[in-house]
Image (cartoon, rainbow, N blue to C red):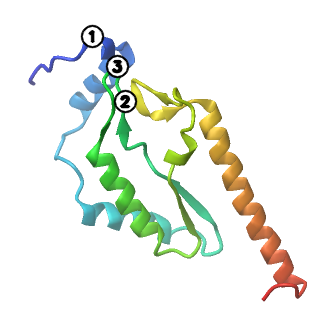
Amino acid sequence: MTEVEIDPAYRKPWLISAFQTMSREYEAIGLITEELFKENRRIVFDRLPKAARFFVLSGNEWVRPRNAGRWLFQPTADVNRWSKEVVEDYQNGVFIDVHPYLVEHDAVDPEQASHFRRSVYYRIYEDIVTRIGADKGAARDMAVGNGE
């Protein structure tokens, strides 16, 4: 096994432990292909009840280390694009891009780019609840003859 030099700011015990577990118990075969990723998503989505509404959140594509600006993390950008493309094939699916919810300058954890402050998750929750409520209202209107 090759030792990799990690910036001391990122040498957290939980992270080191996670990497040790992964290297011991898993075999890396590389990044997943677009075709296989989409196929796996479809397997999961096809098993959901047809009437079930589901939501898929994007990952944060932007890495912002302390005092180092930001840059696009292409693997996450790819997974987001692939996820959105698959979700669009399902009438009951909604893809939610998390980036518009990241309004505070410190909304993103600088050490874990896909972890956010609670306020971010709360805004996403409010949006989902609103969407579900709108669906229920539309269904109720249809049931009583008010819908188109």
* Distance between the alpha carbons at the discs numbered 3 and 1: 15 Å
* Left or right relative to 12: residue 120: right
**Residue at figure coordinates x 30%, y 23% from the top left:** 68
Q: Earlier in the sequence, mark 3 or mark 1?
A: 1
Residue 134 as seen in the image, left or right of residue 88: right
Residue lying at 59% horizontally and 71% vertically, measured from the top left:
92
| Gap in angstroms between the C-alphas marked 3 and 2 | 8 Å
Residue 40 spot, x, y in % from top left:
36, 63
Callout count? 3
User: Pointer 2: what residue?
Assistant: 64
Viewer-proximal residue among 107 and 14 = 107
Instruction: Return the residue at label 3.
Output: 67
Q: Nearer the viewer, mark 3 or mark 2?
A: 3
Q: Position of residue 117 (x, y in %)?
A: 57, 30
Crowd rating for badge 3 (residues with CA inside 10 Å; few <14, some 14–19, many 20+)? few
Q: Position of residue 47 (x, y in %)?
A: 51, 69
**Numbered label attached to residue 68:** none
Element type where label 2 sits in the image: loop
Q: Which residue is mark 1?
A: 8
Residue at screen point 57% across, 32% down = 104
Q: Earlier in the sequence, mark 2 or mark 1?
A: 1
* Mark 2–mark 1 CB contact (< 8 Å): no
Q: Residue furthest left?
A: 2
Q: Label 2, label 1: how many angstroms apart (C-alpha)?
A: 16 Å
Residue type at mark 3: give it. Answer: Asn
Image quadrant assignment for residue 66: top left
Q: Locate residue 35: give its quadrant.
A: bottom left
Q: Residues within 10 Å of mark 2 (few under 14, many from 20)?
A: some
Q: In the structure shown, which secondary structural element does the residue marked by tag 1 occupy?
A: helix
